Image (cartoon, helix red, strand yellow):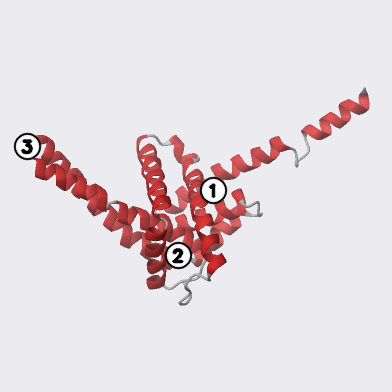
């Protein structure tokens, strides 16, 4: 009777209860996504924000470590310079190729030109290079210590060595960016969910390489 009801209430409000654990995870997904959004607003800070989001998502939300927001802020400060340079370099390349694709596609639609359509398709294929690099750069930056040059070299190696993962990560990135540009509300959760999805590919690749040899370390970030 009363003892059973008391035990049931304790179970319901037990912080180790499955429901509350799921609630905590969902709260962290929303909180980290919003923190990433706020830290990315100056635009030039989007790189370190992405590295910090991946680190907190993979280590805390997925890995079960504590203090996700503290980890986010520490990684954001630590990787600020390298993250900003990566975002500026490859983000600029991504935008230029994207605009080139759109211009070529518009011209192909207006004129019916097959060469222009082929050019638009070529731009689309080339977009995979910076998109894939960005998908690897920030997970690598959050996990290992690199110089800027060594970081880009390692990301390029992972790009080719794990091509199916690169294509899947780039596709997920494109879908999430498209959704967030059309609707504002998904920004509350999609950034962290994307980082978690990327971690499924990246962490598996890291473990495979770590089991064979240490990744190249040519200095600090």
Secondary structure under tag 2 reads helix
Structural crowding at the residue carrying mark 1, measured as other residues with C-alpha within 10 Å and reported as few (<14), some (14–19) or many (≥20): many
**Left or right placement of residue 114 versus residue 39 in this view:** left
Disc 2/disc 1 C-alpha distance (Å): 17 Å
Does residue 13 appear in this view?
A: yes
* Mark 2 in CB contact with mark 1 (< 8 angstroms): no
The percent position of residue 77, horizontal first and vertical second, equals 50, 64
| In front: label 1 or label 3 | 3
**Left or right placement of residue 124 versus residue 37 in this view:** left
Name the outermost residue toward the bottom: 219
Does residue 48 appear in this view?
A: no
Which quadrant: the N terminus? top right
Secondary structure under tag 1 reads helix
Residue at 37% across, 63% down? 156
| In front: label 3 or label 2 | 3
The percent position of residue 149, horizontal first and vertical second, equals 37, 72
- The label on residue 32 is 1
Structural crowding at the residue carrying mark 2, measured as other residues with C-alpha within 10 Å and reported as few (<14), some (14–19) or many (≥20): many
The residue indicated by pointer 2 is 80
Q: Quadrant of residue 74?
A: bottom right
Q: Tell which circle, 3 or 2, labels the residue nearer the N-terminal end.
A: 2
Q: Tell which circle, 2 or 1, labels the residue nearer the N-terminal end.
A: 1
Residue at 51% across, 54% down? 54
The residue indicated by pointer 3 is 111
Residue at 38% across, 40% down? 175
Disc 3/disc 2 C-alpha distance (Å): 46 Å
Q: On screen, 7 above or below 1?
A: below
The percent position of residue 12, horizontal first and vertical second, equals 77, 32
* Mark 3 in CB contact with mark 2 (< 8 angstroms): no
**Left or right placement of residue 107 versus residue 46 in this view:** left
């Amino acid at each position: 009777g009363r003892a059973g009801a008391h035990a049931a209430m304790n179970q319901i409000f037990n912080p180790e209860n499955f429901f509350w654990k799921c609630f905590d995870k969902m709260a962290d997904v929303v909180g980290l996504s919003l923190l990433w959004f706020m830290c990315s607003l100056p635009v030039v800070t989007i790189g370190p924000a992405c590295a910090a989001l991946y680190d907190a998502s993979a280590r805390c939300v997925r890995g079960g470590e504590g203090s996700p927001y503290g980890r986010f802020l520490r990684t954001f400060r630590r990787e600020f310079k390298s993250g900003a340079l990566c975002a500026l370099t490859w983000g600029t390349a991504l935008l230029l190729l994207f605009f080139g694709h759109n211009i070529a596609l518009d011209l192909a639609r207006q004129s019916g030109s097959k060469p222009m359509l082929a050019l638009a398709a070529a731009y689309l294929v080339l977009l995979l290079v910076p998109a894939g690099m960005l998908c690897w750069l920030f997970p690598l930056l959050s996990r290992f210590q690199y110089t800027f040059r060594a970081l880009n070299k390692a990301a390029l190696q992972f790009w080719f060595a794990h091509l199916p993962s690169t294509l899947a990560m780039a596709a997920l990135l494109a879908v999430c960016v498209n959704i967030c540009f059309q609707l504002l509300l998904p920004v509350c959760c999609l950034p962290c969910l994307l980082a978690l999805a990327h971690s499924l590919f990246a962490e598996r690749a890291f473990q495979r390489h770590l089991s064979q040899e240490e990744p190249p370390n040519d200095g600090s970030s």
